[in-house]
Amino acid sequence: MKIDFNRDALLGALNLLTSVIPARTPKPILRCVRITAGKKDVQICATDLEVGADIEVGQAKIGEAGEVVIPADRLMAIVRESADDVLSLQAKDDSCHITGSDSHFTIFSQQPEQYPQMPVFDESTDMEIQLTDLQAGIGQCLFATAKESSRYALNGVLLEIKGKKLSLVATDGRRLARSVISLAAQPEGQMATAKIIMPAKAMILLEKIATSGKEVAAIKLLDNQVLIRCANVVISSSLVEGNFPKYEDIIPSDYDKKMKLSTGAVLSAVRRAALLTSEESRGIKLSAKKNLLVFTGRAAETGDAKVDMPIEYKGEPIEMGFNPQFLIEALRVIKTDEFELELGQSDRPGLLKSGANFLYVLMPINLS
């Protein structure tokens, strides 16, 4: 096999693929990428057996067809440090040679036939969605997934189809984020009423795909897998097993304390009030009374902070404690200048809404 790569194109592909490579694995071959040169195109793929990505690399001149499996970290380091516009890659026997204008590297390779097979995306699709819309939806909920949980469903993002609406929902048990995306057409087949859970790793991959704003993501369900094709990238992912919580049951619908707030102003107030919190007093208090919202933070060994914000509010006074970082993460993904804050009793969750397509439920904390 012999290929002349445009360095920037190869680096862009490797930047995406290395996020698939597992940090630890008993199978050394999974620390590798497989490079396949056909008659007309070059494919590079990586997988951890649950999530995989297959990229067609542009700006590559094929001198000889073939395939090679080499360690991803070594290849990435060579390409990243190279100053050449073009890098030549040649595989022979059990080694791979990478040549630049003034450099030559030899990397020992593994047997291509031992590398896991990647699923193939045929021409049929179950659903299509603008990639930018999908990435925006992922950005508004991915942060709320559980980082480590024995309830595996909480480690992923729920995709739920209802008519021409796609809901993306994530929760870690202490907060919940939902983003709703409008579809151009109702999905077909089993995708029409699908409720599937995708691992966070696959969603991170989708969010990282470079886009010009015109790309369409084609989605297909295959048994316990989902395939997503976007331009020159195909992402494959096993679905997360388990039952996602009945999230609609915990979204409040009877609150009478409502206020419309400036997103930027609240973000600033929360950050400032949290400056004097500590590991022991991790929360900040929100106090709403007639036409005023007050943010306070306190650390017994340091002092306290207080930020006043004039608002339009004529409801009953209320005080609630929240984790400031959980508030900050939600406020960062709100795309509108204003959002609605709805509160009930002090022991019930707070509800943030931005337009009709984003909501965030946050459990209160006890600051006494």
Image: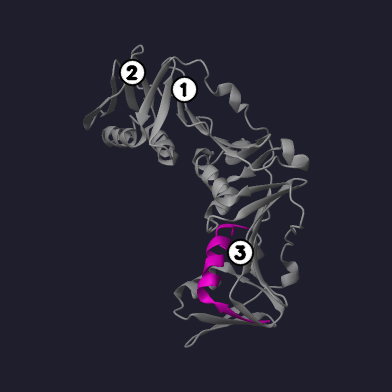
Q: Is residue 226 left or right of residue 85?
A: right
Question: Which residue is under mark 1?
Answer: 349
Quarter of the view holding residue 29 = bottom right
Is 160 situated above or below 248? below
State the residue at coordinates (34%, 36%): 267
> If the image is split into quadrants, where does the C terminus sit?
top left
Q: Are marks 2 and 3 in contact (CB under 8 Å)?
A: no
Q: Residues within 10 Å of mark 2 (few under 14, many from 20)?
A: some
Furthest residue toward left: 303
Question: Which residue is under mark 3?
Answer: 31
Q: Note whether residue 315 is visible.
A: yes
Residue type (three-letter) at the residue carrying disc 1: Pro
Q: Are marks 1 and 2 in contact (CB under 8 Å)?
A: no
Q: Earlier in the sequence, mark 2 or mark 3?
A: 3
State the residue at coordinates (43%, 40%): 335
Question: Which residue is under mark 2?
Answer: 313
Question: Where residue 313 sits: x, y (%)?
Answer: 33, 18
Question: Where residue 348 sits: x, y (%)?
Answer: 46, 18
Furthest residue toward top: 316
Q: Earlier in the sequence, mark 1 or mark 3?
A: 3
Residue type (three-letter) at the residue carrying disc 3: Arg
Residue type (three-letter) at the residue carrying disc 2: Tyr
Which of discs 1 and 3 lies nearer the camera? The answer is 1
